[in-house]
Image: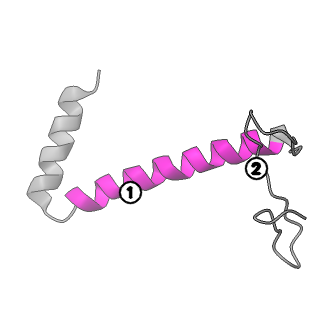
């Protein structure tokens, strides 16, 4: 096993890290798993962004109402 690509002991885990394009020795990876992993990571980051927005403006009812009015006016 290569350094930096260790799996979690006791769990059936697999590292899905693609090689760089200019690497001399190509390390194979499962492209379907990488595609799914990328989709999940992007979804989680999107949810984190929405949570950040909600908690920031929910502290004051006036700020929350202003944000809702702004969103309603700017959504096409």
Image coords of residue 25 (percent x, y) = 87, 42
The answer to the question of whether label 1 and label 2 lie on touching residues, with beta carbons closer than 8 A, is no
* Residue 7, percent from left and from top: 83, 68
Tell me the number on the disc at residue 17. 2
Q: Judge by depth and name the residue closer to the eye, 62 or 11.
A: 11
SS under mark 2:
loop
Most foreground residue, 13 or 18: 18
Quarter of image, res 60 = bottom left
Residue at 86% x, 78% y: name it.
9
Mark count: 2
Looking at the image, which residue sits at the far bottom?
A: 10
Q: What x and y, as percent, mark residue 47?
A: 47, 51
Give the foreground label among 1 and 2.
Answer: 2
- Residue shown at the point (56%, 46%) measured from the top left: 43
Q: Dot 1 corresponds to which residue? A: 51
Instruction: Give the numbered dot on residue 66.
Output: none
Q: Residue at x 64, y 48 (%)?
A: 40
- 1 magenta-colored: no
> Observer-nearest residue: 8 or 74?
8
Residue 35 falls in image quadrant: top right
Q: Is residue 55 left or right of residue 49?
A: left
Q: Main secondary structure of the magenta part?
A: helix
Q: Residue at 20% x, 43% y: name it.
A: 68
Is 56 magenta? The answer is yes
Whether residue 34 sits left or right of residue 26 in the image: it is left
Quadrant location of the N terminus in the rendered image: bottom right
The CA distance from mark 1 to mark 2 is 28 Å
Q: Which residues are magenta?
A: 33-57
Q: Position of residue 8 (x, y in %)?
A: 81, 73
Bin the neighbour count of mark 1 within 10 Å (Cα to Cα): few under 14, some 14-19, many 20 and up.
few
Label 1 or label 2, whichever comes before in sequence order: 2
Q: Secondary structure at mark 1?
A: helix
């Amino acid at each position: 096993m290569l350094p930096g690509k260790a799996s979690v002991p006791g769990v059936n885990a697999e590292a899905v890290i693609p090689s760089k394009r200019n690497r001399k020795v190509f390390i194979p990876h499962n492209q379907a798993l990488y595609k799914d992993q990328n989709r999940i990571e992007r979804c989680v980051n999107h949810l984190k962004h929405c949570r950040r927005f909600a908690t920031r403006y929910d502290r004051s009812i006036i700020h929350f109402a202003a944000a809702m009015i702004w969103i309603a006016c700017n959504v096409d």
